[in-house]
Image (cartoon, rainbow, N blue to C red):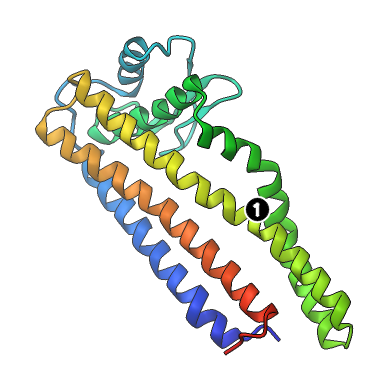
Amino acid sequence: MFGNGSYMLWVLLPSLALSLYAQWRVKSAYGRWSRVVNARGLNGAAVARAIMEARGLTHVGIESIQGMMTDHYDPRGKVIRLSESSVQPSVAAMAIVAHELGHAEQDKVGDAMLNLRAALVPAANLGSGLAMWLLIGGFALQSMGSIGLGSLVAWTGVLMFSAAVLFTLVTLPVEFDASRRAKRTLSDLGLVSGSDAKGVNAVLDAAALTYVAAAAGAVLQLLYWVSLLTGRRD
């Protein structure tokens, strides 16, 4: 009913390949630069305080969180949470902390894309949870002869899934900009040496690829469902 062979060829395999490559890039870059002590010998918290002072982000709190590479900025609580992996004074920790504070800087200036992403969260969560069930139900109804109703249900699923796809697309400029801010800030403040800058770029560029992989996979899946509904089935 869903053209499994076509789905694997045009959606599942390319998405999986890109996702695995992105994960490999992240593990490779992080694995290398997490073992390299940055030239200033600063751990994640020290990097965060230096950036917050320089960028007028002293209103942002700092908290600890369990796990590795679980660092994130919480715009609601105005707090950056640093993982266990940021305790060490590594180049990787410096890159990750600076990136998360890039989000804090976006929040401070009211970045339009960051606000749009936040606004899309409810619709994206609902769409990613219900869309597949609506698509399956819609195609099932069509196979049983209820063409009109099945088409309506399936297109509703496509519409809901589109919200999740839009979220992944909006995430790209948000993450790219946070990394750009991180690189610029670390350079402006003199926190990175030449070799450190290379490591920061490697870690942040690899992380960005994971968002590209997620967006590409979501778009491919959306296009596949649309092609089935519009009759362009292989």
User: Image quadrant of residue 202?
Assistant: top left
The amino acid sitting under disc 1 is Ala
Residue drawn 71% across the image and 58% down it: 160
Residue 56 in the figure: left or right of residue 131 = left
Q: Can you say whether 117 is above or below 22 in the image?
A: above
Residue 136 in the figure: left or right of residue 76 = right
Residue 110 x/y as whole percent? 52, 24
Q: Can you say whether 111 is above or below 58 in the image?
A: below
Residue 15 x/y as whole percent? 46, 68
Closer to us: 121 or 30: 121
Residue drawn 48% across the image and 15% down it: 60
Q: Can you say whether 148 is above or below 73 in the image?
A: below
Residue 8 x/y as whole percent? 52, 80
Residue drawn 42% across the image and 40% down it: 175
According to the picture, the residue beneath numbered tag 1 turns out to be 163
Q: Residues within 10 Å of mark 1 (few under 14, many from 20)?
A: many
Quadrant location, the N terminus = bottom right
Residue 65 in the figure: left or right of residue 22 = right
Q: Residue furthest left?
A: 194
Closer to us: 208 or 158: 158
Q: Is residue 93 visible?
A: no
Quadrant location, the C terminus = bottom right
Q: Is residue 228 visible?
A: yes
Marks counted in the figure total: 1
Q: Can you say whether 208 is above or below 8 in the image?
A: above
Q: Identify the element where label 1 is drawn.
A: helix
User: Image quadrant of residue 200?
Assistant: top left
Residue 168 x/y as whole percent? 53, 51
Residue 5 in the figure: left or right of residue 41 = right
